[in-house]
Amino acid sequence: MEKSYYQAFVAQTPEEILLSVFKKEEDVLVGISLDDGAYLEGIVLDISRVDGHLKSVCILLPENRVSYFNIHRISMITIKQPKKMVVELSKGAISRPITTTDEKLTVLQLKRWLLNSLNELGGQIQEFNIESIPVDDLNNRLNVQDVFGALITVVPQITADALGKDAWSNVESIVLKQAETLQLEITDKVLTISIAIDKALPNKLSEVIEDKLLQIL
Protein backbone atom coordinates (compact mmCIF):
# COMPACT_ATOMS: atom_id res chain seq x y z
CA MET A 1 0.00 0.00 0.00
CA GLU A 2 2.90 2.37 0.73
CA LYS A 3 3.86 2.55 -2.96
CA SER A 4 0.44 2.35 -4.56
CA TYR A 5 -1.97 3.93 -2.08
CA TYR A 6 -2.67 6.80 -4.48
CA GLN A 7 -4.18 4.32 -6.97
CA ALA A 8 -7.18 4.03 -4.65
CA PHE A 9 -7.95 7.76 -4.85
CA VAL A 10 -11.17 8.74 -6.61
CA ALA A 11 -12.17 11.97 -8.37
CA GLN A 12 -14.03 14.48 -6.20
CA THR A 13 -14.91 18.14 -6.50
CA PRO A 14 -12.68 20.76 -4.83
CA GLU A 15 -15.60 21.55 -2.52
CA GLU A 16 -15.86 17.92 -1.39
CA ILE A 17 -12.13 17.69 -0.75
CA LEU A 18 -12.01 21.00 1.10
CA LEU A 19 -14.88 19.94 3.37
CA SER A 20 -13.11 16.63 4.11
CA VAL A 21 -9.97 18.55 5.03
CA PHE A 22 -11.96 20.85 7.33
CA LYS A 23 -13.60 17.90 9.11
CA LYS A 24 -10.24 16.25 9.93
CA GLU A 25 -9.33 16.42 13.60
CA GLU A 26 -5.70 17.10 12.73
CA ASP A 27 -4.42 19.92 10.55
CA VAL A 28 -3.75 19.14 6.89
CA LEU A 29 -1.69 21.49 4.74
CA VAL A 30 -3.41 22.39 1.46
CA GLY A 31 -2.64 24.51 -1.58
CA ILE A 32 -5.55 26.39 -3.16
CA SER A 33 -5.55 28.03 -6.59
CA LEU A 34 -8.23 30.67 -7.21
CA ASP A 35 -9.84 31.61 -10.51
CA ASP A 36 -7.86 34.89 -10.67
CA GLY A 37 -4.53 33.05 -10.54
CA ALA A 38 -3.87 33.63 -6.84
CA TYR A 39 -2.33 30.73 -4.88
CA LEU A 40 -2.75 30.18 -1.14
CA GLU A 41 -1.13 27.53 1.02
CA GLY A 42 -2.11 26.86 4.61
CA ILE A 43 -4.57 25.30 7.08
CA VAL A 44 -8.36 25.55 6.67
CA LEU A 45 -9.79 27.24 9.79
CA ASP A 46 -13.46 27.55 8.89
CA ILE A 47 -16.02 27.07 6.13
CA SER A 48 -19.31 28.96 6.31
CA ARG A 49 -22.70 27.91 4.94
CA VAL A 50 -25.55 29.99 3.57
CA ASP A 51 -28.94 28.29 3.11
CA GLY A 52 -27.22 24.92 3.49
CA HIS A 53 -24.62 25.57 0.78
CA LEU A 54 -20.87 26.00 1.28
CA LYS A 55 -20.03 29.69 0.90
CA SER A 56 -16.82 31.17 2.33
CA VAL A 57 -13.45 29.85 3.46
CA CYS A 58 -11.07 31.07 6.15
CA ILE A 59 -7.50 29.83 5.83
CA LEU A 60 -4.42 30.28 8.04
CA LEU A 61 -1.33 31.20 6.01
CA PRO A 62 2.37 31.27 6.97
CA GLU A 63 3.47 34.04 9.35
CA ASN A 64 0.02 33.86 11.04
CA ARG A 65 -1.75 35.60 8.19
CA VAL A 66 -5.42 34.79 7.58
CA SER A 67 -7.21 34.97 4.22
CA TYR A 68 -10.88 34.72 3.26
CA PHE A 69 -12.42 33.86 -0.10
CA ASN A 70 -15.58 32.52 -1.72
CA ILE A 71 -15.46 28.75 -2.12
CA HIS A 72 -16.77 29.02 -5.68
CA ARG A 73 -13.60 30.87 -6.68
CA ILE A 74 -11.51 27.72 -6.19
CA SER A 75 -10.11 26.36 -9.46
CA MET A 76 -7.89 23.68 -7.89
CA ILE A 77 -7.00 22.28 -4.48
CA THR A 78 -3.78 20.38 -3.73
CA ILE A 79 -3.42 18.14 -0.69
CA LYS A 80 0.15 18.65 0.50
CA GLN A 81 -0.01 15.77 3.03
CA PRO A 82 -2.00 13.04 1.24
CA LYS A 83 -0.97 10.28 3.67
CA LYS A 84 -3.07 12.02 6.31
CA MET A 85 -6.06 12.00 3.97
CA VAL A 86 -5.96 8.55 2.33
CA VAL A 87 -9.27 7.49 3.90
CA GLU A 88 -11.11 10.54 2.57
CA LEU A 89 -9.33 10.68 -0.79
CA SER A 90 -10.11 6.99 -1.42
CA LYS A 91 -13.64 7.31 0.04
CA GLY A 92 -12.90 4.53 2.54
CA ALA A 93 -11.19 2.09 0.16
CA ILE A 94 -8.11 2.62 2.34
CA SER A 95 -9.18 2.13 5.93
CA ARG A 96 -6.75 4.34 7.85
CA PRO A 97 -4.15 7.09 7.44
CA ILE A 98 -0.63 5.96 6.54
CA THR A 99 1.58 6.66 9.53
CA THR A 100 4.99 8.18 9.15
CA THR A 101 6.34 5.52 11.50
CA ASP A 102 5.38 2.78 9.01
CA GLU A 103 3.58 0.84 11.72
CA LYS A 104 3.84 -2.95 11.56
CA LEU A 105 1.66 -5.57 13.20
CA THR A 106 2.19 -9.20 12.21
CA VAL A 107 -0.49 -11.88 12.40
CA LEU A 108 1.34 -13.52 15.30
CA GLN A 109 1.65 -10.22 17.15
CA LEU A 110 -2.06 -9.57 16.67
CA LYS A 111 -3.00 -13.01 18.02
CA ARG A 112 -0.71 -12.54 21.00
CA TRP A 113 -2.27 -9.16 21.69
CA LEU A 114 -5.77 -10.63 21.53
CA LEU A 115 -4.82 -13.45 23.87
CA ASN A 116 -3.23 -11.07 26.36
CA SER A 117 -6.34 -8.86 26.24
CA LEU A 118 -8.80 -11.61 27.24
CA ASN A 119 -8.68 -10.79 30.95
CA GLU A 120 -9.69 -7.18 30.28
CA LEU A 121 -13.12 -8.44 29.19
CA GLY A 122 -13.81 -10.63 32.21
CA GLY A 123 -12.60 -13.98 33.41
CA GLN A 124 -15.39 -15.88 31.65
CA ILE A 125 -14.23 -14.93 28.13
CA GLN A 126 -12.47 -17.96 26.66
CA GLU A 127 -11.44 -16.78 23.19
CA PHE A 128 -11.30 -14.14 20.48
CA ASN A 129 -11.99 -15.86 17.16
CA ILE A 130 -10.79 -14.11 13.98
CA GLU A 131 -10.36 -17.21 11.84
CA SER A 132 -12.85 -16.06 9.19
CA ILE A 133 -11.23 -12.62 8.85
CA PRO A 134 -8.63 -12.06 6.07
CA VAL A 135 -5.61 -10.87 8.04
CA ASP A 136 -3.02 -11.00 5.28
CA ASP A 137 -3.33 -7.22 4.89
CA LEU A 138 -1.81 -4.89 7.51
CA ASN A 139 -4.80 -2.56 7.43
CA ASN A 140 -7.13 -5.45 8.23
CA ARG A 141 -4.98 -6.50 11.18
CA LEU A 142 -4.89 -2.96 12.54
CA ASN A 143 -8.66 -2.71 12.13
CA VAL A 144 -9.13 -5.99 14.01
CA GLN A 145 -7.06 -4.57 16.84
CA ASP A 146 -9.13 -1.37 16.82
CA VAL A 147 -12.44 -3.28 16.95
CA PHE A 148 -11.37 -5.33 19.94
CA GLY A 149 -9.75 -2.27 21.48
CA ALA A 150 -13.10 -0.49 21.25
CA LEU A 151 -14.79 -3.47 22.89
CA ILE A 152 -12.24 -3.40 25.71
CA THR A 153 -13.14 0.26 26.26
CA VAL A 154 -16.88 -0.39 26.23
CA VAL A 155 -17.22 -3.50 28.45
CA PRO A 156 -16.05 -1.87 31.73
CA GLN A 157 -18.68 0.84 31.22
CA ILE A 158 -21.42 -1.71 30.64
CA THR A 159 -20.38 -3.84 33.63
CA ALA A 160 -20.15 -0.90 36.02
CA ASP A 161 -23.25 -2.13 37.90
CA ALA A 162 -24.65 -5.51 38.92
CA LEU A 163 -27.19 -5.67 36.08
CA GLY A 164 -24.50 -5.04 33.49
CA LYS A 165 -22.16 -7.60 35.03
CA ASP A 166 -24.90 -10.20 35.03
CA ALA A 167 -25.78 -9.55 31.38
CA TRP A 168 -22.18 -9.64 30.21
CA SER A 169 -21.46 -12.85 32.17
CA ASN A 170 -23.54 -14.72 29.57
CA VAL A 171 -20.89 -14.04 26.91
CA GLU A 172 -18.04 -16.57 26.85
CA SER A 173 -16.60 -16.23 23.34
CA ILE A 174 -16.22 -13.40 20.83
CA VAL A 175 -16.16 -13.97 17.07
CA LEU A 176 -15.28 -11.39 14.43
CA LYS A 177 -16.72 -11.83 10.93
CA GLN A 178 -16.45 -9.93 7.65
CA ALA A 179 -19.67 -8.17 6.58
CA GLU A 180 -20.79 -5.05 4.75
CA THR A 181 -22.51 -3.47 7.74
CA LEU A 182 -21.73 -3.47 11.45
CA GLN A 183 -23.94 -5.90 13.36
CA LEU A 184 -23.73 -7.55 16.79
CA GLU A 185 -25.56 -10.65 17.95
CA ILE A 186 -25.34 -13.09 20.84
CA THR A 187 -26.15 -16.76 20.30
CA ASP A 188 -25.29 -19.64 22.64
CA LYS A 189 -23.00 -17.41 24.74
CA VAL A 190 -21.08 -16.30 21.64
CA LEU A 191 -20.90 -12.59 20.76
CA THR A 192 -20.51 -12.23 17.00
CA ILE A 193 -19.30 -8.88 15.65
CA SER A 194 -19.85 -8.53 11.91
CA ILE A 195 -18.05 -5.62 10.25
CA ALA A 196 -16.37 -4.56 6.99
CA ILE A 197 -12.85 -5.05 8.31
CA ASP A 198 -11.25 -3.94 5.03
CA LYS A 199 -12.99 -0.55 5.03
CA ALA A 200 -12.68 2.58 7.13
CA LEU A 201 -14.12 1.84 10.56
CA PRO A 202 -17.12 3.88 11.75
CA ASN A 203 -16.46 7.19 13.46
CA LYS A 204 -16.72 6.95 17.25
CA LEU A 205 -16.46 3.17 16.98
CA SER A 206 -16.62 2.62 20.74
CA GLU A 207 -19.90 4.50 21.02
CA VAL A 208 -21.41 2.59 18.09
CA ILE A 209 -20.39 -0.78 19.56
CA GLU A 210 -21.66 0.18 23.01
CA ASP A 211 -25.04 1.21 21.61
CA LYS A 212 -25.44 -2.02 19.64
CA LEU A 213 -24.23 -4.15 22.54
CA LEU A 214 -26.73 -2.58 24.94
CA GLN A 215 -29.51 -3.47 22.51
CA ILE A 216 -28.74 -7.20 22.64
CA LEU A 217 -27.55 -7.86 26.19
Image (cartoon, helix red, strand yellow):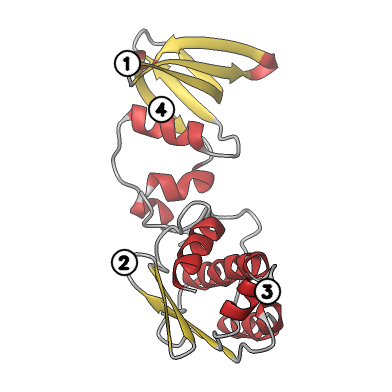
Q: Amino acid at mark 4?
A: Ile
| Lower position in the chain sequence, tag 3 or tag 2 | 3
How many other residues sit within 10 Å of disc 1, few (<14), some (14-19) or many (≥20)? few
Quadrant where the N terminus is found in the figure: bottom left
Q: Mark 3, mark 2: which one is toward the viewer?
A: 3
Q: Mark 4, mark 1: which one is toward the viewer?
A: 1
- Report the residue marked by disc 3: 162
Residue 157 position, x and y percent, is 66, 64
Mark-to-mark CA distance, 4 and 1: 24 Å
Mark-to-mark CA distance, 3 and 4: 54 Å
Residue 52 position, x and y percent, is 33, 21
- Report the residue marked by disc 2: 180
How many other residues sit within 10 Å of disc 4, few (<14), some (14-19) or many (≥20)? some
Q: Quadrant of residue 142?
A: bottom right
Q: Mark 2, mark 4: which one is toward the viewer?
A: 2
Residue drawn at (65%, 86%) of the image: 115
Q: Quadrant of residue 43?
A: top right
Residue drawn at (53%, 39%) of the image: 24
| Lower position in the chain sequence, tag 3 or tag 1 | 1
Q: Amino acid at mark 2?
A: Glu
Under tag 2, what secondary structure?
Answer: loop
Disc 4 + disc 1, Cβ < 8 Å: no
Tell me: residue 162, above or below residue 79.
below
How many other residues sit within 10 Å of disc 3, few (<14), some (14-19) or many (≥20)? few
| Lower position in the chain sequence, tag 3 or tag 4 | 4
Front residue (pair 122, 95): 122
Q: Mark 2, mark 1: which one is toward the viewer?
A: 1
Label at residue 51: 1
